[in-house]
Image (cartoon, rainbow, N blue to C red):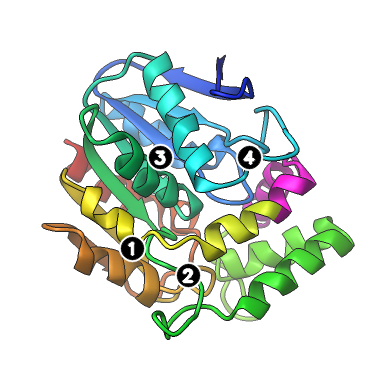
């Protein structure tokens, strides 16, 4: 475990384990780098060096009052890549983390990156407008922010059920996974939790797709109610030259825990 300083001095909490080809796993909202428990074990056993970090405002990283935008997040990722002196690193971004990859490539280029993977990623454009009829209405994001302000803890518990596709009949994850996700979520700064709704919900990553000049894998569940597949996964796969696209039929957002074995196998095959 270590801390790397971002450009503005914010401490970024990093875990760097194993040897071999480096892979950075970039977490989703509102979790931490520890969400990749299943993937970390599988990648280590496959001989990779696995690096996870907590986004600013989340987990054990610094919790500044501002800076919750994708230009800053991309520069934070650059600080980690440079701080660890990485070359030929693979980047795997889940959900909000896919945005870091897109903006990093457009701001910093792909000279230090060998491959990219977007898993249930927001990269594309989530907000519904005249250019994006399949997007999510702005009122949804405003409602989320209001619910977080009113009772962040109740929101996190309710959000996790949609995130993992838990319903009256289906329960793809255990109560333990739901409890664990709650613990990771409450570690975040409430300010970061709120501000990041606008960051992932209203940032248009479509102009960033031209910067994907490396082999790219896109994975998305067709049953994702948190990050709908059409304006994100399918849009990314169509716009990124040569991208490989795998749809997980019926799967919800939290693929890393609902189908970890399948996701791990697809990741390892692509990264190898």
Q: CA distance from mark 2 to mark 3?
A: 26 Å
Residue 155 horizontal/vertical position (percent)? 77, 63
Task: Give the mark, 2 or 3, whose residue is nearer the N terminus.
Answer: 3
Left or right of 212 in this view: 142 = right
Residue 126 badge: 2
**For the residue labelled by badge 4, is the local secondary structure a helix, a strand or a loop?**
loop
Say which label, 1 or 3, has the lower sequence index. Answer: 3
Q: Quadrant of residue 168?
A: bottom right
Residue ID for mark 3: 39
Q: Whole-percent x and y of residue 153?
A: 82, 56
Q: Indicate left or right for 208 with 175 as reference.
A: left
Identify the element where label 3 is drawn. Answer: helix
Sequence-wise, which precedes: disc 4 or disc 3?
A: 3
From the image, state whether disc 4 or disc 2 is nearer to you.
4
Expressed as whole percent of the image width and height from the top left, the position of residue 262 reads: 32, 54
Residue identifier under label 4: 67
Is residue 43 part of the magenta span, yes or no? no
Q: Measure the alpha-carbon separation of dots 4 and 1.
A: 22 Å
Q: Secondary structure at mark 1?
A: helix
**Residue at 54% across, 58% down:** 200
Camera-side residue: 47 or 80? 80
Between the C-alphas of marks 4 and 2, the distance is: 20 Å
Q: Which secondary structure type mostly characterizes the magenta part of the structure?
A: helix
Which numbered disc flags the more N-terminal residue, 4 or 2? 4
Q: Which residue is mark 1?
A: 206
Where is 26 relative to 234, above or below?
A: above
């Amino acid at each position: 475990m270590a801390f790397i300083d971002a450009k503005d001095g914010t401490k970024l909490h990093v875990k760097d384990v194993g040897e071999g080809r480096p892979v950075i796993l970039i977490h989703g909202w509102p979790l931490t780098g520890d969400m990749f428990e299943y993937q970390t074990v599988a990648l280590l056993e496959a001989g990779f060096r696995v690096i996870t970090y907590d986004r600013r405002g989340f987990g054990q990283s610094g919790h500044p009052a501002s800076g919750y935008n994708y230009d800053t997040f991309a520069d934070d990722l650059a600080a980690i890549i440079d701080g660890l002196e990485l070359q030929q690193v693979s980047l795997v971004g889940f959900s909000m983390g896919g945005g870091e990859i897109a903006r990093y490539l457009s701001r910093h280029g792909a000279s230090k990156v060998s491959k990219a993977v977007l898993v249930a990623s927001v990269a594309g454009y989530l907000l519904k407008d005249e250019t994006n009829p399949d997007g999510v209405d702005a009122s949804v994001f405003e409602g989320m922010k209001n619910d977080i302000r009113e009772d962040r803890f109740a929101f996190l518990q309710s959000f996790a059920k949609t995130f993992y596709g838990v319903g009256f009949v289906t329960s793809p994850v255990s109560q333990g996974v739901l409890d664990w996700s709650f613990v990771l979520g409450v570690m975040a700064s409430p300010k970061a939790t709120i501000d990041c709704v606008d960051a992932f919900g209203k940032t248009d990553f479509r102009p960033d797709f031209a910067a994907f000049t490396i082999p790219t894998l896109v994975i998305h569940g067709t049953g994702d109610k948190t990050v709908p597949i059409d304006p994100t996964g399918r849009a990314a796969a169509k716009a990124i030259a040569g991208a490989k696209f795998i749809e997980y039929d019926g799967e919800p957002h939290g693929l890393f825990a609902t189908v970890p074995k399948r996701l791990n196998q697809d990741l390892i095959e692509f990264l190898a």
